[in-house]
Image (cartoon, grey):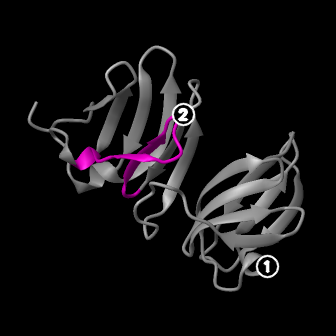
Amino acid sequence: GKIWVTTTDGGADGGLNELDAQGKLIQSIPFRELTPSLANIAGLSELAPNEFILSTNFGIMQYSVKTKKLKKISISGYTNENYLISCFLTDSRQNKWLGSNNGLYRKSSNSETYKKYDLSKLEGADASSNEITRIFESPKQGLWLLTNNGLFLYKYDIDKIERHGYDQAK
């Protein structure tokens, strides 16, 4: 029944905010209360009630609302923590997905580690194709990936990604 939102205002006034179901602010936790040099939170995912994974300028962190403690963690198979995770998704098949500015990562329900998908190697793609900003699941299609180089579709049945981006030549 709660909504958690990250905000930023040049870093200094940003933070982690807890809202009720109607959007009323319950509490605001400024970045400087989490850790003094924290400048941004690029991605947020609930690990358990009142436990979150945050992708920050310090790397991947776990935050407990109860203890108000922030600790650095690693994600098995996530190859470069210098790249921020912008989105987290658990799909209808219980796969866990990470969208980052370094590609797409999937941890299947029977695996302990993440597998990387490099979108820059696909036809019509470039390095900005790995800058994933959002992931949406379609019950009929698969996963739609919004990137800084267009739209991509991950197809479950063939474990492949295809580009659906705008082509200026056509």
At 51% across and 17% down in the image, what residue appears? 139
* Element under disc 1: helix
At 53% across and 45% down in the image, what residue appears? 112
**103 horizontally vs 170: left or right:** right
Which of discs 1 and 2 lies nearer the camera? The answer is: 2
Task: Find residue 118 and report its horizontal and vertical position in percent.
Answer: 29, 48
| Mark 2 neighbour class, 10 Å CA radius: few under 14, some 14 to 19, many 20 or more | few
Q: Residue furthest left?
A: 169
Task: Find residue 162 and report its horizontal and vertical position in percent.
Answer: 26, 30
Q: Which residues are magenta?
A: 101-120
At 43% across and 65% down in the image, what residue appears? 83
Q: Where does the C terminus fall, quadrant-wise?
A: top left
Identity, as a three-letter code, of the amino acid under mark 2: Asn
- Please give the residue where the numbered disc 2 appears in the rendered image: 110
In front: 126, or 116? 116
- Counting labels gives 2
* Element under disc 2: loop
Q: Residue furthest top?
A: 140
At 72% across and 56% down in the image, what residue appears? 52
Residue 71 falls within the magenta-colored stretch: no
Q: Which numbered tag is attached to residue 33? A: 1
